Amino acid sequence: MLEAEKSLKTGLSELQESWHLQCSSWKGPGRGVPPALMDDGVEAVRAVAVPVSPGYCYQCQSQVPPRSGHCSACRVCVLRRDHHCRLLGRCVGFRNYRPFLCLLLHAAGVLLHVSVLLGPALSALLRAHAPLHTAALLLLPWLMLLTGRVSLAQFALAFVTDTCVAGALLCGAGLLFHGMLLLRGQTTWEWARGQHSYDLGPCHNLQAALGPRWVLVWLWPFLASPLPGDGVTFQTAADMGLVAS
């Protein structure tokens, strides 16, 4: 069990370091920000002059830019609102969509790596017991602990491994889904309604969401890669057709 505890401590240490790394990318701009910015870095619009096709938010009682949406949880309209992430407790929009994608990628990688690190110790533990005991330990570790069938160290090993595998699958599925939206130039709201007005082609869509250095920001989300736009006006597929002609 010493090897199992060592692997568990190593895995938890890597999880903690990755969590601190990703949380730093979600810190707000600090105090003294303009009223049009939320404290968490998601740009909000309460009364912004929009030159083209403004919408109207009845909750905020003001005009809002295209692609923005009102969040009932944040109680504000968010530029290019994608969705409200309940796990992170904030909206994902124009300013923090790139850190959100990097969070999914890095979290999936770290959780998968921790699962691989814990794999040999968990495999040795499972081989030492009957198949029924093994299945119960993997599926119901809490029940096995409460009934005294396993020790606290064995429970921790099984529980952390289960959590890492489930988290890696969840983050991987989210990354695949948002990667599809990214290539199509859509938000979750636009995908649900079948809108493709802002699909500029895969390359332009990547640059619009991740900036000109979109290849490198996947490896290091803090890299300077300014977004080509202000979150208020967006180039459409029709505009690209006019420019090409």
Image: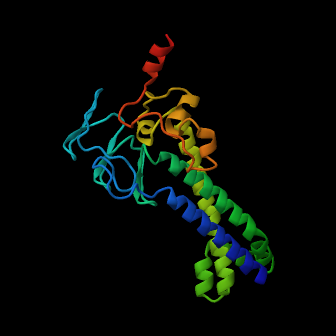
Residue shown at 42% from the left, 36% from the top: 190
Residue 107 pos. (x, y %): 60, 58
225 left or right, relative to 78: right
> In which quadrant will I find the N terminus?
bottom right
Residue 95: image quadrant is top left
Image: 163 above or below 142 = above
Answer whether residue 161 is visible to the viewer in this image: no
Q: Nearer the viewer, residue 56 or 32?
A: 32
Answer whether residue 18 is visible to the viewer in this image: yes
Residue 31 pos. (x, y %): 34, 58
In the displayed orientation, state which residue is furthest to the bottom: 148
The count of marks equals 0
Residue 209 pos. (x, y %): 50, 38
Residue 234: image quadrant is top left
Residue shown at 37% from the left, 31% from the top: 233
185 left or right, relative to 55: right
Image: 220 above or below 166 = above
Residue shown at 69% from the left, 75% from the top: 8
Q: Nearer the viewer, residue 135 or 44?
A: 44
In the displayed orientation, state which residue is furthest to the front: 32
Residue 78 pos. (x, y %): 34, 45
Residue shown at 80% from the left, 76% from the top: 124
In the displayed orientation, state which residue is furthest to the left: 61
